[in-house]
């Protein structure tokens, strides 16, 4: 399965992806984590040592071949992963999208194209979980960068601006061949918070597949520079994300990535 995670800035996408990637890998599945944010943070969230994370080289745009059906990799997938992936804790393999080298240097069209090509080719790996951490922008949807995802997970906080971001992104996703769009309710402090997210999503036909509570554990782990899974492995947030892992692992029927949802 190829799952892309999107939402408003600060909604908790990166923490969710990093924790989920390692939990799935511990079950024995190959996991590829894609940091598709031009301001990358996924490596450190996974637990890659900071000096190693600082040296990660993004996927080069030369890997892309332009074809009538969209960008695809010029190089075999295994060679791309061997040459450009960084192995993190629990054998999660991490690849990163390009980021701006200089101010006023133009768009990141090539960087988006290579991520799209990688995601397309990863669809041939039926044994692999691919988790893509998108930036807090609809650009990955407006460009079609995430069009090859089987599942779009929208991370929502229980307040209006976050929910509106989810609504807008879901509308864009409906125009792409993404088989399913679901919501993770994050930073839930009370039953009222859960009810607010649930009601909003029900009104817009979006299933909520996990509910993650607010916890100071996340803030404490971030302040200490420690992955949440290592800082609070038995905490409420990790337990809730493990439930999301159960949900993803339990989808035994392949999602069909051929038309709108």
Image: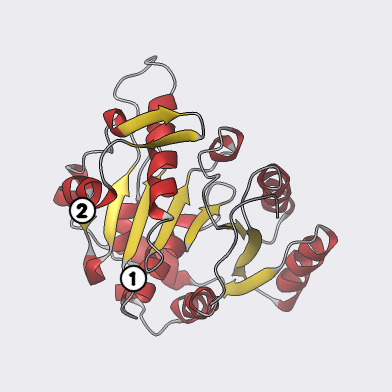
Percent of width and height locating residue 181: 65, 58
Percent of width and height locating residue 189: 64, 72
Question: Can you say which quadrant of the picture contains the C terminus?
Answer: bottom right
Percent of width and height locating residue 207: 71, 67
Q: In this view, does 200 lie above or below 174?
A: below
* Quadrant of res 221: bottom left
Q: Residues within 10 Å of mark 2 (few under 14, many from 20)?
A: many
Kindly state the secondary structure of the residue where label 2 is placed.
strand
Q: Which residue is drawn at 74% across and 52% down?
A: 160
Residue at which label 2 appears: 86
Kindly state the secondary structure of the residue where label 1 is placed.
helix
* Camera-nearest residue between 204 and 63: 63
Q: Is residue 45 left or right of residue 136?
A: left
Q: Which residue is drawn at 71% across and 53% down?
A: 163
Label 1–label 2 contact, CB within 8 A = no
Q: Residue at x 41, y 44 (%)?
A: 36
Q: Residue at x 53, y 39 (%)?
A: 140
- Number of residue marks: 2
Give the number of the disc on residue 22.
1
Earlier along the polypeptide chain: callout 1 or callout 2? Answer: 1
Q: Can residue 135 be seen in this view?
A: yes
Q: Is residue 54 left or right of residue 70?
A: left
* Quadrant of res 11: bottom right
Q: Which residue lies furthest to the bottom in this view?
A: 234
| Distance Cα–Cα, label 1 vs label 2 | 14 Å
Is the image coloured rainbow, by chain, by secondary structure, or in one colour?
A: secondary structure
* Camera-nearest residue between 30 and 33: 30
Q: Can residue 157 be seen in this view?
A: no
Q: How crowded is mark 1: few (under 14 residues within 10 Å), some or many (20 or more)?
A: many
Q: Is residue 90 above or below residue 144?
A: below
């Amino acid at each position: 399965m190829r799952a892309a995670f999107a939402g408003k800035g600060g909604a908790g996408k990166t923490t969710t992806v990093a924790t989920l990637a390692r939990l799935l890998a511990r079950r024995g599945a190959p996991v590829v984590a894609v940091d598709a944010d031009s301001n990358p943070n996924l490596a450190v969230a996974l637990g890659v040592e900071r000096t190693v994370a600082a040296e990660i080289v993004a996927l080069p745009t030369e890997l892309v071949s332009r074809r009538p059906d969209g960008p695809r990799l010029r190089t075999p997938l295994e060679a791309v992963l061997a040459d450009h992936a960084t192995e993190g804790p629990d054998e999660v393999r991490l690849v990163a999208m390009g980021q701006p080298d200089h101010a006023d240097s133009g768009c990141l069209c090539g960087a988006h194209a290579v991520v799209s090509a990688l995601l397309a080719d990863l669809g041939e790996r039926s044994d692999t979980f691919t988790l893509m951490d998108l930036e807090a922008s609809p650009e990955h949807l407006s460009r079609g960068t995430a069009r090859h995802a089987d599942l779009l997970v929208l991370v929502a906080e229980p307040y209006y601006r976050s929910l509106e971001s989810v609504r807008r992104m879901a509308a864009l996703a409906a125009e792409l061949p993404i088989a399913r769009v679901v919501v993770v309710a994050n930073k839930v402090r009370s039953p009222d918070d859960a009810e607010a997210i649930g009601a909003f999503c029900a009104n817009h036909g979006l299933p909520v597949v996990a509910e993650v509570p607010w916890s100071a554990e996340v803030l404490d782990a971030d302040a200490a520079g420690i992955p949440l899974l290592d800082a609070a492995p038995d905490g409420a947030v990790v337990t809730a994300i493990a439930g999301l892992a159960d949900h993803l692992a339990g989808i035994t029927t392949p999602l069909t990535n051929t038309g709108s949802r």
